[in-house]
Image: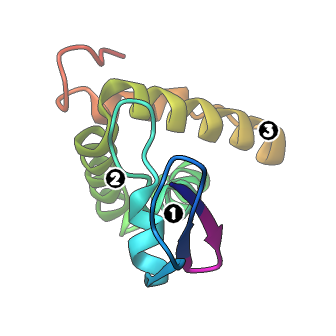
Amino acid sequence: MLYLWNLGSIKSQNSTFDQAKEPISYQFSYDMIENFYTVSNGSKIELDAYLEEELYDLITYCIQNSNASDYSIKKDRIKEIGQELFADGGVDALETMYFSIEHRIKGEISQDAKPYRSLWNNISSEWNY
């Protein structure tokens, strides 16, 4: 059976190996299709882009406002994001995300994000910075 993807629907059509008489159409919501895609280790690709942007904003804020009254709240959210990433993709997800963030911060505001890696140290024994 051949499956054709078309903006939210999957249509199966006859091939030389099938005996079906008519194409069958299935309707899927955008969320169902989005959740269907998985990375190689089987974890779902969910909101990583949003988490990356939030993490970038938080670390940038912390670097530029180390004496701010809400500094500890921002650091706590950075820790939470690390836990979410680890739950979704393990240490590989942490490494991938931080690599991206570190290079963006260095390129965009010419600052070093490495000191903030240690905020994720208690998430896994494999993550020690």
Do labels 1 and 2 touch, CB within 8 Å? yes
Could you tell me the amino acid type at mark 3? Ser
Foreground of the two, 70 or 77:
77
- Residue 35 in the image, given as x and y percentages of width and height: 39, 63
Q: Residues within 10 Å of mark 3 (few under 14, many from 20)?
A: few
Foreground of the two, 78 or 41:
41
Calculate the distance from the C-alpha at mark 2 to the C-alpha at mark 3. Answer: 23 Å
Q: Residues within 10 Å of mark 2 (few under 14, many from 20)?
A: some
Calculate the distance from the C-alpha at mark 1 to the C-alpha at mark 2. Answer: 9 Å
Q: Residue at x 53, y 27 (%)?
A: 114
Question: Marks 2 and 3: which is nearer the front?
Answer: 2
The circle drawn on residue 1 is none
| Element class at badge 3 | loop
Q: What residue sits right under mark 3 in the picture?
A: 110
The quadrant of the rendering that contains the C terminus is: top left
- Position of 97 with respect to 69 (left or right) is right
Question: Marks 3 and 1: which is nearer the front?
Answer: 1
Which of pointers 2 and 3 lies earlier in the amino acid sequence?
2
Could you tell me the amino acid type at mark 1? Glu
- Residue 72 in the image, given as x and y percentages of width and height: 30, 57
Q: Which residues are magenta?
A: 4-9
Q: Is residue 126 magenta?
A: no
- Residue 16 in the image, given as x and y percentages of width and height: 60, 49
Q: Residue at x 34, y 52 (%)?
A: 81
Q: What residue sits right under mark 2 in the picture?
A: 81
Which of pointers 1 and 2 lies earlier in the amino acid sequence?
1
